[in-house]
Image (spheres, helix red, strand yellow):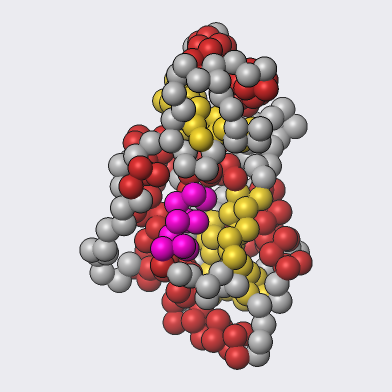
Amino acid sequence: MEILQTAAGLQDRTESWRRAGLRIGLVPTMGALHEGHLQLVRAAAQENDVVVVSIFVNPTQFNNPEDFRLYPRLPETDGALLADTGCTALFAPTVEEMYPQPTLLRFDFGTLERVMEGAHRPGHFNGVATVVSKLFHLSRPHRAYFGQKDLQQVAVVRQLVQDLSFPLELVVFPTVRETDGLAMSSRNRRLSLEARAVAPHLYQALTLARRLVDEEQTVAEVQRQTLDFLRQQPAIELEYFDISDARTLQPLAPEQPANGPVALCLAAWLGGVRLIDNVVVER
């Protein structure tokens, strides 16, 4: 596995691979890798000739400076984890390399970014779109791999690919979970033992909501029962629980049955750590 730290170095490799007729897979990450990331890398290695994994904690998608400062950074551990996954090149640039000057371009994804994460983290998806666009231009992948845990991010990247005509296939893998249901996340490393013991209740709440959707309860009733369940865990500070159309991510009307495909999405604070999760119900 080669380690590249400059945009020019990655572009040189990309061009040589393209000239050789090799197919390129890209797995963008912010590091602190877990099994969810590694599954994406292994899949990319099976489906492409070469694989680029990027590790870059992108400052422009953090609207909370403290969250950016505390985000886990484990370069040596990440490198060791990637060693036997089929990763061809690890792209690990500095902030100065990715942003040699302030970015003036601004993305607007309309209603797609005015709900859930977009509503609670202003500017977040502008930062996501900026760095993903840079990675697409530098690595010129045939396929790019993302996880469903970041459902809204996937929707934004899909819109980005469509609107800017990036010639690539977007590949989305299901959320990978711990044995107790907690969605794997780099932020889980920051949970205290007490918070970690409570964290599975987030997925339990989504599982309850999924059952209520299957029973054709109204959106309001799904919301009421799910919120009642979460209130039983005072350590969980819920930021939002949205019941949305899984295609547009726009909220469903309270009085209507939660007919699918439905996206059940939540964000919550637990011991000072912000976690997100979702379940998509195909009906």
Please determine whether, in this image, residue 281 is positioned above or below residue 133: above
Q: Examine the structure image and report whether residue 157 is included in the region drawn in magenta.
A: yes
170 displayed left or right of 61: right
- The C terminus appears in which quarter of the rendering? top right
Q: Is residue 138 above or below residue 39?
A: below
Q: x, y percentage for residue 85?
A: 73, 63
- Name the quarter where the N terminus is drawn: bottom right
Residues drawn in magenta: 154-163
Residue 24, by quadrant, is: bottom right
127 is within the stretch colored magenta: no
Residue 232 in the image: state x and y as whole percent.
55, 8
Instruction: Specify the principal SS of the magenta part.
Output: helix
Can you tell which quarter of the image residue 65 is in? top left
Residue at 37%, 61% (x, y): give it: 130
**Residue 119 occupies which quadrant of the picture?**
top left
**Residue in the image at 65% along x and 90% along y:** 20
| Residue 98 position (above or below residue 40) | below
Please say whether residue 235 is visible from this viewpoint: no
Q: Position of residue 78 (x, y in %)?
A: 62, 57
The residue at the point 76 percent across, 67 percent down is 46
Frontmost residue, 178 versus 195? 178
Q: How many discs appear?
A: 0
Q: Position of residue 43 (x, y in %)?
A: 72, 60
Above/below status of 35 relative to 214: below
Image point (47%, 42%), residue name: 248
* Residue 143 visible (yes or no): yes
Query: Closer to the camera, 128 or 163?
Result: 163
| Nearer the observer, 203 or 225 | 225
